[in-house]
Image (tube, helix red, strand yellow):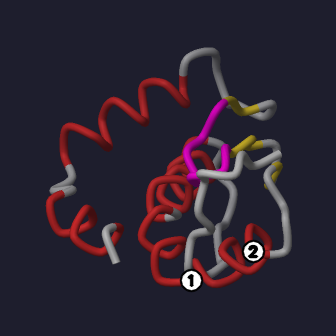
Amino acid sequence: MKNKNQRELNKEQIHVLMDLPFEYFKARAHEEKVKWDLELSFIVDGYEKGGRKIFGLNLNDLCFPIYDLQEPKHGFLNNFISWYMLTNDNKSNNNNLNQ
């Protein structure tokens, strides 16, 4: 449930924020040796329709992964988030979020 001060994300903001979960899905598929053919738009569409649990990955209202019920091994999600935050330049992403 959203509080009265929480604003809705627009489609462009969702696309930017969904990069982390999308990259996580690709890394998880690689770890599990499973083919990954889905596009980012598939994940974004599910999120826009209210999906916050996608393939076992639970997202908050800012598209950030909370936990994964299908982790290939314990700690995989947390390790991925740490790696992602250290290796990606989020400066350009933050500019898009302020619109």
Q: Is residue 36 left or right of residue 10?
A: right
Residue 48: image quadrant is bottom right
Q: What residue type is disc 2 on? A: Glu
Which residue is depicted at the point 55% across and 17% down? 75
As helix, strand or loop, the secondary structure at mark 1 comes to: helix
Task: Identify the mark at residue 48; answer none if there is no mark.
Answer: 2
Task: Identify the mark at residue 11; answer none if there is no mark.
Answer: 1
Q: Percent from the top left, x then y, of residue 13?
A: 46, 73
Q: Is residue 12 left or right of residue 89?
A: right
Image quarter where the C terminus lies is: bottom left
Task: Identify the mark at residue 25; answer none if there is no mark.
Answer: none
Residue 31: image quadrant is top right
Specify which label sits upstream in the sequence, 2 or 1: 1
The region drawn magenta spans 60-66
Overall secondary structure of the magenta stretch?
Answer: loop
**Above-or-below relation of 5 to 45:** above
Tell me if mark 2 has few (under 14), some (14-19) or many (20+) residues whose alpha carbon lies within 10 angstroms of its own: few
**Which residue reaches farthest front?**
4
Q: What residue type is disc 1 on? A: Lys
